[in-house]
Amino acid sequence: MKLIDRYILKKFLTTFFFCVLLLTLVIVIIDFTEKIDKFNNAGVSNDEILTYYASFIPFLAGLLTPITTFIAVVFITAKMAAQTEIIAILSSGVSFRRLIVPYLMGALIIGGMSFYLNGWVIPNANKYRINFEVTYLDKPFYFNDTDIHFKVGDDLYAYIFRYNNRIDRGYKFTLEKFEGSKLKKKLTANTISWDTVTNKWKLQSWQSRIFEGFNEIIEEGSAMDTTLNILPLDFDNNSGLESALTIDELNNHIALLQSRGADDVGLYQIEKYIRYMIPFTTLILTFIGLVVSARKSRGGTGFQIALGFLVAFLFIILFIFSKALAEKSTGDPIYAIWSPNILFTFVGILLYKSIPR
């Protein structure tokens, strides 16, 4: 590593961590002032508040990483260009392509660190954060969906008309087993409730019907225990659950939802794709930030920084739009989630070809 590489890399990483720290502190202060009344009304202790923000800060830092990386690149490069350092470096025989190297090294360090933190560390911190918000800040959650369908096994389907998550009880339960397109067994019950002692579901006023050709075997009973691929947790407040799962847990949860034929599997796939996308976003925005701010401008550093913020704003708008499309899509959301990266890669290439080297 040459001296110029160490010089740029040091400035890049130092500015990046300063931007993350500064923006995070500002957001935390604003967030605390907005929530202080809720903390007091809920009787939250100081230790719990400190623990909450200790888990909230990593979440914010991970969220801000791509944009703060871009801001850091634009800031240090525009400043170097204004002080003719970029011109001096290029005049000494260093090509613009070679100048990119320390920036990409910094982006790789930040991207790798971001992937590890977003994949495993931050989700574990989010478990406490989300539980705290559900307990103290959100309104009590009531599961109010009706006509609930689950695929609970191979050719095995469950239906609940209504579920009360406050007492863990469902009404008008049906369990059907198929062989191909033929119904082989149907189990119905007036109610289904969770037994915390046996950790099983208890059926009340049940009836079993087994179909064997033209014959039908009917059995009835007042109560029966059964095991299903469903838990009371499936009816709890799952808001933000995707951000509290590590990548390994996400993969397992996605597989579970797909085995059930669940409708909300796309939400967890989107979260997974975003975590893999962010390191590449960091690389792309670093490249664009360098290209945008490397040229000395008559408008000064302020103009280039403003231009950088405009590009960052456009990226955020496109990302929000593509995420909304992914959430509405019935297919695999990977293409919608990756579209901002793909588009801005071409933007970066066009900008690179337009600058004098």
Image: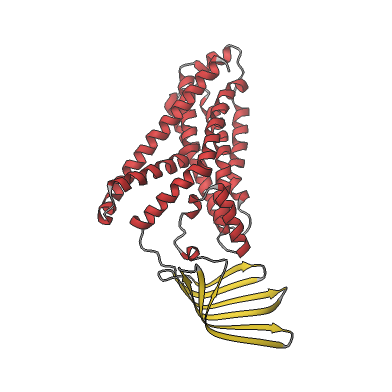
Residue pictured at 61% horizontal, 13% vertical: 93
In this view, the residue farthest toward the top is 92
In this view, the residue farthest toward the right is 213
Q: Nearer the viewer, residue 117 or 187?
A: 187
Q: Report the coloring of the rendering.
A: secondary structure
Q: Nearer the viewer, residue 192 or 71?
A: 192
Q: Nearer the viewer, residue 81 or 272?
A: 272
| Residue 10 horizontal/vertical position (percent) | 48, 22
| Residue 184 horizontal/vertical position (percent) | 68, 79
Residue pictured at 44% horizontal, 43% vertical: 59
Q: Is residue 86 something one can see in this rendering?
A: yes
| Residue 331 horizontal/vertical position (percent) | 63, 57
Q: Which quadrant of the figure contains the C terminus?
A: top right
Query: What number of labels is visible?
Result: 0
Residue pictured at 57% horizontal, 31% vertical: 108
Q: Which quadrant of the figure contains the N terminus?
A: top right
Q: Nearer the viewer, residue 15 or 299?
A: 15
Relative to 216, is 115 above or below?
Answer: above
Q: Is residue 297 something one can see in this rendering?
A: no
In this view, the residue farthest toward the front is 197
| Residue 280 horizontal/vertical position (percent) | 58, 38
Residue pictured at 46% horizontal, 54% vertical: 240
- Left or right of 287? Residue 24 is left
- Left or right of 159? Residue 305 is left
Relative to 72, is 169 above or below?
Answer: below
